């Protein structure tokens, strides 16, 4: 764990020790001696069937009849076998299979065969499990419990006695296992998912009044620990909030159905998160690609934003989450103005400090690379690098370090990014123009350099002016060796570009024929190939403007993008 401070290494050691302690406690609590604390394994009466807000895919059942099962962005050939009998294409597919979220696709079918198939797979699952492995990870267990509860009508209506008993007995046992193991989830969304599922179980199934009161307090505390004051998530991944809201909104409805007042942290989180998601949308209505945002479902985002009763005052700035938005005319700019999240939440974070995205109306112009879908995880490390973002790179090194450590990666579910430790940001209005100034010290320890960035969006939205400066901490700096730098401006794959006849100039052309002129001084302008990772079909070839030069320790580059009159 080279590059981490003593305090951070100590923090990792503490996280690891706590995780080991939680795992041991989970095993102990699920033992016959303590299992009674979580209630009877008998399911009891199902009081509520919670709503599922995730959209159904009408193509799922026809493809399944053709022995193809698509989960987590990748299809698997069943070859006439059960999906539980084949070798999973990857862990993400396997988790989705055991999570049973796909039941919603079958319940949406009018074909009685689809409903029978769903019941048959649920029963088959109960007969093949030994209580170990990926299927029993708390987050996977939580998703499965939520899915079985939400689709109880599909699984239990018209079921024969043997099927009914197998499913309900298994569900009761799974709820007990979830009560014992949810604390063993990795930090962040997996833990909140597991605890939300447990909360949902106690709301929906009778006989859990004592556990319901205790779990409600834990549920409220976990929400408060993960949802920041501006509604963002502690991981700084805006897309995670969509998944969280799709889980929390049905829980709110179940509180109402039971005649219980939802805990205040739940209601605050719902309202604040909706406001944050509105703030993080680009002109096309989708989320800006920062810190793990991939092919975010527009349907899921539209669903959570459709809850008009969650009225929220629009955010002026998402300071707690470290994002800023500039909006003038039809132009929107969103920028990353924050450091990486705490290391235990940074397994999906990117080294994109001071990067930005820009849209003109609904058309995306400059975009970060985003994250690849689970089927394309070989691109993951590249997508997280600073060079895949619209910002400055020194000596081909990222501004934040990717911490590679087997134990830590196993603990967090991936390698976290670390840094930069110091980030400053300010927004002001200057005669109608929106002005953002910021700096970070991600290159200071290695090269003694600070990156200063200034963006100005004109009052009309027709001009974006930028200034990127490298310099020392307090006084003029002279490096022993000149260092190369590059400022990247990744274009969305749907727009084209070309160099202009004028030196240091290029043009961006949208499909609608709108032309933006890009000019720069202080560095050489080139057009190079790039990669857009956040596409459902896989990484796409794209183009980028790159401003290249070398710094001796104090360098300023100015650039501008303006609509051609």
Image (cartoon, grey):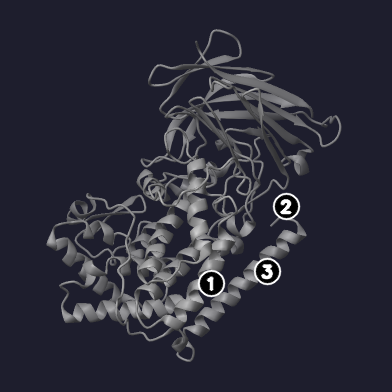
Q: Is residue 366 above or below residue 346?
A: above
For the N terminus, which image quadrant? bottom right
Of labels 3 and 2, earlier in sequence is 2
Q: Gap in Å between the C-alphas at discs 2 and 1? A: 35 Å
Locate residue 34, reporting x and y percent: 49, 88
Residue under pointer 1: 218
Locate residue 148, reporting x and y percent: 31, 69
- State if disc 3 and disc 1 touch (CB < 8 Å): no
Give whichever of 99, 53 is nearer the camera.
53
Q: Residue at x 38, y 47 (%)?
A: 306
Q: Gap in Å between the C-alphas at discs 3 and 2? A: 18 Å
Give whichever of 15, 362 is nearer the camera.
362
Q: Residue at x 36, y 40 (%)?
A: 537
Q: Gap in Å between the C-alphas at discs 1 and 3? A: 21 Å
Label annotation for residue 14: 3
Locate residue 293, reporting x and y percent: 48, 45
Residue 183 makes an appearance in the image: no
Residue under pointer 2: 3
């Amino acid at each position: 764990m080279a590059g981490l401070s003593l305090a951070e290494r100590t923090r990792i050691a503490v996280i690891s020790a706590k995780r080991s302690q939680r795992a041991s406690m989970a095993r102990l609590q699920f033992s016959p001696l303590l299992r009674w604390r979580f209630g009877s394994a008998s399911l009891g009466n199902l009081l509520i069937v919670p709503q599922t807000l995730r959209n159904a895919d009408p193509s799922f059942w026809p493809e399944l009849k053709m022995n193809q099962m698509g989960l987590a962005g990748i299809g698997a050939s069943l070859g006439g076998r059960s999906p539980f009998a084949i070798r999973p294409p990857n862990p993400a597919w396997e988790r989705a299979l055991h999570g049973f979220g796909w039941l919603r696709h079958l319940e949406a079918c009018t074909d009685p065969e689809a409903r029978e198939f769903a019941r048959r797979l649920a029963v088959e699952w109960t007969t093949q499990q030994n209580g170990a492995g990926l299927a029993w990870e708390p987050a996977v267990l939580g998703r499965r419990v939520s899915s079985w509860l939400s689709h109880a009508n599909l699984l239990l209506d018209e079921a024969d006695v043997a099927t009914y008993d197998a499913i309900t007995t298994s569900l009761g046992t799974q709820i007990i296992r979830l009560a014992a193991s949810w604390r063993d989830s990795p930090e962040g969304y997996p833990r909140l998912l597991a605890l939300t599922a447990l909360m949902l179980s106690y709301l929906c199934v009778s006989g859990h009044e004592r556990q319901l009161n205790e779990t409600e307090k834990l549920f409220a505390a976990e929400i408060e620990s993960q949802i920041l004051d501006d509604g963002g998530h502690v991981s700084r991944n805006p897309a995670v909030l969509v998944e969280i809201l799709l889980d929390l909104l049905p829980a709110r409805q179940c509180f109402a159905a039971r005649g219980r007042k939802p805990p205040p942290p739940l209601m605050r989180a719902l309202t604040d998160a909706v406001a944050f998601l509105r703030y993080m949308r680009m002109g096309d209505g989708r989320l800006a690609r920062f810190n793990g945002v991939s092919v975010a479902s527009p349907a899921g985002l539209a669903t959570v934003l459709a809850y008009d009763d969650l009225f929220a005052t629009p955010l002026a700035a998402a300071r707690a989450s470290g994002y800023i938005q500039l909006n003038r005319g039809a132009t929107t700019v969103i920028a990353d103005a924050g450091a990486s999240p705490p290391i235990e939440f940074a397994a999906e974070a990117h080294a994109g400090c001071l990067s930005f995205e820009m849209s003109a109306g609904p058309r995306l112009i400059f975009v970060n690379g985003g994250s690849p879908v689970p089927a394309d995880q070989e691109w993951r490390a590249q997508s997280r690098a600073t060079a895949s973002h619209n910002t400055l790179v020194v000596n081909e090194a990222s501004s934040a370090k990717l911490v590679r450590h087997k134990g830590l990666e196993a603990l967090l579910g991936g390698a976290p990014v670390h840094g930069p430790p110091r980030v400053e940001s300010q927004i002001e209005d200057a005669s109608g123009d929106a002005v953002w100034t910021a700096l970070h010290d991600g290159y200071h320890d290695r090269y003694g350099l600070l990156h200063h960035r200034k963006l100005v969006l004109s009052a009309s939205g027709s001009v974006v002016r930028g200034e990127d400066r490298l310099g020392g901490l307090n006084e003029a700096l002279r490096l022993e060796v000149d260092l190369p730098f590059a400022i990247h401006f990744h274009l969305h794959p749907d727009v084209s570009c070309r160099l202009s006849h004028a030196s240091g100039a290029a043009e961006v052309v949208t499909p609608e024929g709108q032309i933006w002129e890009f000019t720069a001084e202080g560095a050489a302008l080139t057009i190079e190939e790039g990669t857009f990772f956040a596409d459902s079909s896989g990484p796409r070839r794209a183009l980028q403007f790159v401003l290249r030069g070398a710094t001796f320790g104090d360098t300023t580059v100015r650039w501008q993008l303006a609509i051609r009159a």
